[in-house]
Image: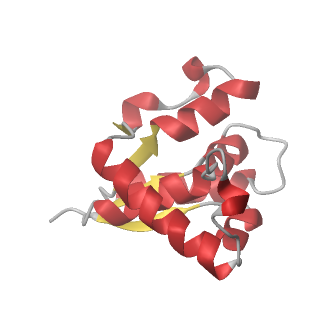
Amino acid sequence: MRHSVLLDTSFFIRLLNDEDPLHKNARDYFKYFIDNEIVTRISTISIAEYCVMGDISELPLRNLQVVPFNLDHAKRAGEFAQTIFAQKNITRAELIPRAIIPNDSKLFAQADYDASTTHFVTSDTRSQATF
């Protein structure tokens, strides 16, 4: 089985901005993944986030496998969110009229669902706060 990595929005922000302090790191990681035939993946969720401030044409899509957020991912994201809400002592009443699930939880669900995805790559320290 070929291994793959799911790259998040913050990775692409750094990769595509040569003035970002982490640009070289992102560029070197991306080159490593390509050179070592590690499948690089991007979620449609990350594409949407990137397109808030950037344009889809800036993304290196020819080197990426696009992962749509699907029903199985949604189910897993809901399970993750239940755990997160419980750990943060968020009550059911606080989730009414509906629970808003952070995008990071959805990305984690996508990475977790696919056995070939061995790593989730981010430079966003706020992702750690999700769990």
Residue 24 horizontal side relative to residue 104, left or right: right
Query: Residue 82: percent from the left, percent from the top?
Result: 52, 68
Residue 10 horizontal side relative to residue 30, left or right: right
Work out whether residue 108 or residue 102 is closer to the camera in this orientation and state it.
Answer: 102
Query: Residue 33: percent from the left, percent from the top?
Result: 42, 57
The reply to whether residue 123 is visible in this rendering is no
Image quadrant where one finds the C terminus: bottom right
Q: Residue at x 68, y 70 (%)?
A: 91
Residue 90 horizontal side relative to residue 104, left or right: right
For residue 105, above or below residue 90: above
Image quadrant where one finds the N terminus: bottom left
For residue 41, above or below residue 80: above
Residue 46 horizontal side relative to residue 113, left or right: right
Q: In the picture, residue 105 is in which quadrant?
A: bottom right
Q: Residue at x 68, y 72 (%)?
A: 128
Q: Residue at x 45, y 58 (%)?
A: 78
